Image: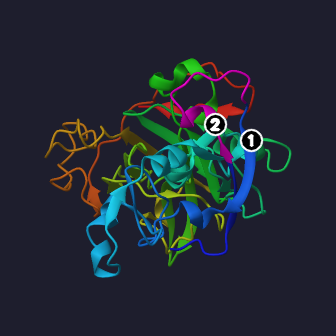
Amino acid sequence: MGNVGREAALAVLPAAMSTEPQQGVAARMLYFPAELLDCHACRLPLKPPIYKCEAEHRVCSTCSGLHGEVCTSALLHSKMADEFAAAASETCDYVRYGCDAGAVVYHLAAEHRRSCPHAPCGCPDGCGFFGSRQMLLNHVSGPDHSRPIIDIRYGQEWKLSLPLSHRWYVLLGEVDQAAAAAGADRHRNVFLVSLGERGDTTAVSVVCVRADGGAPEAAQFSCRLAVEHPGDGTRVIFESPLMSSSSLSGGAPAAGNVRALPVPNEYLSGDSIPLSIHIHKLEPPSAAVPDIPTAVPLPPTTPAVATPSHPHSAAATVTLALHSPTGDQSNKKRKATNPRKYSTPNRS
């Protein structure tokens, strides 16, 4: 995990290294090995409080207690090293994809990259495109693929008719109200529905498209997929209490690599899959209430479906349930807020 031999351009902000007011002092770009700002023990970027010994070993507070095992010199807190580490910064690697975070403090840069909403995602078609989610939406709906973006809301069941002639479809979640003031689609979550062959069935899967899925603050979702037999109304249901995420670095996930709803051929409607999809946005862990199912229950006339007892269980369930055919659903269309091609499915 070391950075030996790696050089970085770090902006040093002189004003941050002194409590005295300075005027007319601009940041200067200095070039030096980034390892000078890494802990001598763990080789991770140093962050205050920083300690230094007589042998010029600089270590972080986590490693300071073990320093005596490898060095006999006493450690002292280095205020200058603290100020320097707090002043050194670098730009995000994803500036070209739209990141406007500006200068990021060096010891926070790795954390920023893990959670940066502009981290690049690939194209489901595997055409070699990489860009932010905003760029991906423009790419998919543009002349390269001319595919519609299906607009959905959370907590509601949407009925889609997905032709088998296309192997993937892009869904766009509703606007994050907390970020609505920014007025950009990058604050909306992107989902990919993939169709793949699995034996004598068609495997239908859904993932959240993003490269920051491992970030603690990243939104999490549960989902339910269902198809209904056109004759007797029998439903095949797939539930996942915690949706997977993917950056699509290798294109759409292969059918065998993700959990999926197996759709028998007799459930097809011509050359299309009559899919019902329900995506639920989970509450953050700090606000989540334990042991409350994350999926909206089926109508009272439907036998209960076995679901995990805890919303964050990694297991998914596939079950059969009888369901009486319902009447026609009204097609409520919502005005698109983006000039791209949008398709609003039926909502039940």
Q: In this figure, which residue is indicated by the disc labeled 2?
A: 14
Residue neighbourhood size for the residue with mark 2, other residues' Cα within 10 Å, grouped as few (<14), some (14–19), many (≥20):
some
- Seen in the picture, residue 175 relative to 303 is either above or below; the reply is above
Element type where label 1 sits in the image:
strand
Q: Nearer the viewer, residue 256 or 97?
A: 97
Percent across and percent down for residue 339 are 75, 26
Asked if the magenta segment contains residue 326, the reply would be no
Element type where label 2 sits in the image:
helix
Q: Nearer the viewer, residue 188 or 157?
A: 188
Residue 191 lies left or right of residue 22; in this view the side is left
Question: Bounds of the magenta span?
Answer: 11-25
Report whether residue 240 is seen: yes
Q: Residue at x 39, y 51 (%)?
A: 226
The dot on residue 328 is: none
Residue 290 lies left or right of residue 329; in this view the side is left
Q: Quarter-wise, where is residue 320 in the image?
A: bottom left
> Which amino acid, mark 2?
Pro
Q: Nearer the viewer, residue 60 or 178?
A: 60
Marks 1 and 2 sit apart, C-alpha to C-alpha, by 8 Å
The dot on residue 28 is: 1
> Which amino acid, mark 1?
Arg
